[in-house]
Amino acid sequence: LLGPRGRVRRARSPLAWPPRGARMPGIKRAHEDRSVLLERRHYQERPVVLEVQDPGNFRVRFKIVKDGGIDSDVGEAQHRCILMGIIPRRACSDAFAVEDDHPKHGYFITDFGNLWAQDGTDMESEIHNLPIDISLTLHFISEPTPTLIASTDDQLPCVLHFERPIPPDDYRPCVVFRTEDTAVEATVVETTKRPVVRGSPGGILAKMWEARSFADAELACDGKAFPAHREVLAAASPVFAATFGGSMKEAASSRIDVGDSTPKAVEALLRCIYTGNLDAGDAPAVLPLAHRYQMECIVRRSGELMLQGLSPETAARTASTFRSFREDKAVAPLWDSLVGRCLVDEALLRATLEGL
């Protein structure tokens, strides 16, 4: 992995850049939920930048895993100083610069809870000192106004208020090490996966959905049955796989009765399994079904559509749905995104509270 100035190599990863020897770094895509180690052994200030799929809405989890030891210049114990935050993409390849006691570019929270930013901010935040092995999660939202939200393992999300509003720009998450012999584990939490059945070309599955030929299973709901294919259902859901492979009556009859739902929701779920397409209007009803049958990608996709269509009219239902399933690892980041949106939009917050 690239450390500051390319000196540290623990493992090469597409998560961090710039690459070795590059004057103007090319963009490297991050892998979802993959933790990487950002490490620094020498005193050289250059931001370690993480690429994200959606620069307008991303969450990054940081955890300090190695504390600074002895300052090699003076031979004395040093105080750890790590900056975690966002930086404009145009400044990613520059050395980290400080002007008039504040960074030239970027908006940061330090590991001891202070805010430090290009607008001159230098003050305490609501986040306490960050001990080793405690995660700090930063959530950046670009619209309606750029906002940075922070939370830790034991502290609820809060908006980071700088001296001035964060100006619109093309930001990326980054880490700046200001002490030697320190390391941070970083995980970019993406929310842009689309559902896919592994090993089956989407075009073939779409044709199977349209033709329904050679169907050998069916999902039934409220008196209406939908033909399907056992192999496709089993590939999409471990619950279906266990059902068809077990000794229950469903395994023999290949018929699964879906309760606590509607025929429209069941059909939308099947369509999404086969084609990857999901209408925004069906998402609130499909999400609970996808959760029931452990279809993580469809859970995530349903939640994304609900967030995209978030308004005062839909806020209460969205909050109720997310809250019911927020322990699901696919829903947890969606819940945090909803909380962040409500924190910066009074109309959404009011609508959500009034709908409880």
Image (cartoon, rainbow, N blue to C red):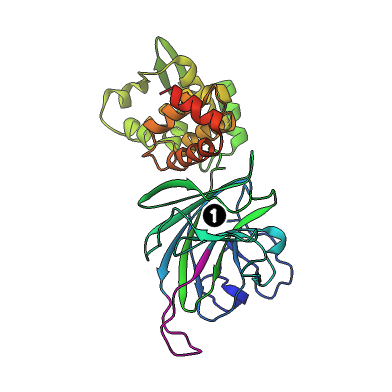
Above or below 92: residue 70: below
Q: Does the magenta stretch include residue 75?
A: yes
Q: In which quarter of the image is the N terminus?
A: bottom right
Q: Does the magenta stretch include residue 351?
A: no
Name the element at disc 1: loop
Which residue in the protein does label 1 denote? 31
Position of residue 138 measured from the top left corner of the image (x, y, whole percent): 51, 52
Above or below 232: residue 31: below
Position of residue 57 measured from the top left corner of the image (x, y, whole percent): 59, 45
Residue 274 in view in this figure: no
Q: Residue at x 58, y 71 (%)?
A: 2
Count how many numbered circles sit on residues in the image: 1
Q: In which quarter of the image is the C terminus?
A: top left
Position of residue 43 measured from the top left corner of the image (x, y, whole percent): 55, 80
**Which residues lie in the magenta part?**
68-83
Q: Residue at x 53, y 23 (%)?
A: 314
- Residue 285 in the figure: left or right of residue 54: left
| Dominant secondary structure (helix, strand or loop) of the stretch shown in magenta | loop
Above or below 18: residue 345: above
Q: Name the amino acid, label 1.
A: His
Above or below 156: residue 42: below
Position of residue 153 measured from the top left corner of the image (x, y, whole percent): 37, 52
